[in-house]
Image (cartoon, grey):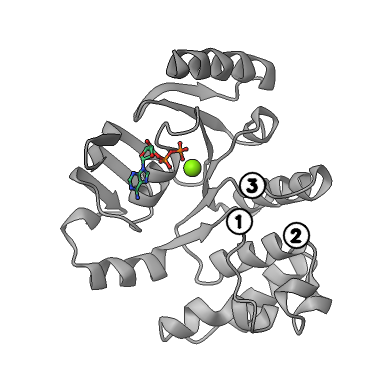
Amino acid sequence: MTPVVTLDRVTKTYGEVVALDEVTLAFPRGRFVAMMGPSGSGKSTLLHCAAALDPPTSGSVMIGDVDVSRLSETRRTELRRKHVGFVFQSYNLMPTVTVEENITLPLRLAGVRPDRAWLGELVDRVGLRGRLRHKPTELSGGQQQRAAIVRALAARPDVVFADEPTGALDLRSAAQVLELLRELVDELGQTVVMVTHDPAAAACAHDTLVLADGKVVDVLNAPSPEDLAVRLARLSRESVA
Ligand code: ADP
Ligand code: MG
């Protein structure tokens, strides 16, 4: 089966800074992949390139069988709206409109009629049925992040990228969000790629990629949180040294 996203020798530079250095990898369908690495190792840049939010400086990014790196910005946006969901650490909900309007906003922007049955199923799954008419600020952080996850899934994307989705949450809400992401993978076959700082969070994923200096340095299958913590501590010391 074609991977959901394939990166081939992807390099991203910002002036002198090489944020990604010839990264080649594929995200297979239906997997939950965690991404870890020291601060500045290129995790967010990799996510943004893989999600077609940012074009690479060189190399190619394929979403399904479409080469994103060759598309105009307009086409890239269209492709993203259809095929990619994104979850941010800070939720990024619009404060002035209700939770329901937030969830359907990307669909309306794409000119797509919301699939009410699907949205209803998602809303029930994340326990926000009674909160749809509230404004985001009236919700807890965990509830806001779950609303953001529903928004990311509304268009039935092929892949959901999440950049430190539990970074702003207390332990209990973080655990709920991780459990939800894992459930989406196990029960709906959703592909999820998540950046995290927390080895325990990575343990919820199938595989963990470890980045350092813009390169993937490890691909680990279900590593233990203890092994990951040791590996990351060593990389962080090396990147400071
Ligand atoms: P991570 O998410 O692993 O902390 P990033 O992908 O955000 O790392 O950043 C990787 C490198 O690229 C860092 O050195 C960072 O300073 C640099 N970088 C990221 N985005 C930009 C940008 N928009 N302009 C300039 N440098 C950037
Ligand atoms: Mg980052």
Which of the two discs, 2 and 3, sits closer to the camera?
2
Q: Which mark is residue 141?
A: 2
Label drawn at residue 87? none
Question: CB of mark 2 within 8 Å of CB of mark 3?
Answer: no
Q: Is residue 185 left or right of residue 178?
A: left
Q: Decide if residue 8 is on the left or right side of residue 169.
A: left
1 or 2: mark nearer the eye: 2
Check disc 2 and report its element: helix, strand or loop.
Answer: helix
Q: Which residue is mark 3?
A: 186
Which image quadrant for residue 43?
A: top left
Give the image location of residue 42, x and y in percent: 39, 36
Marks 1 & 2, CB-CB < 8 Å contact = no
Q: Is residue 98 visible?
A: yes
Structural crowding at the residue carrying mark 1, measured as other residues with C-alpha within 10 Å and reported as few (<14), some (14–19) or many (≥20): few
Mark 2 and mark 3: span between their CA atoms?
24 Å
Ligand 2 under 8 Å from disc 1 Cβ: no
Secondary structure state at the residue bearing disc 3:
helix
Q: Which of the two discs, 2 and 3, labels the residue nearer the N terminus? A: 2
- As measured in the structure, the alpha-carbon distance from the residue carrying label 1 to the one carrying label 2 is 24 Å
* Disc 3 to disc 1, C-alpha distance: 6 Å
x and y percentages locating residue 114 in the rendered image: 55, 83
Label placed on residue 188: 1
The residue that appears at 44% across and 12% down in the rendered structure is 241
Q: Amino acid at mark 2?
A: Gly
Q: In this view of the protein, which residue sits in the foreground, 219 or 145?
A: 145
Percent position of residue 23, x then y: 29, 33
- Compared across the picture, whether 107 is left or right of 68 comes to right
What residue lies at 31% left-to-right and 55% top-to-bottom?
Answer: 54
Secondary structure beneath label 1: helix
Image marks 3 and 1: residues in contact by CB distance under 8 Å: yes
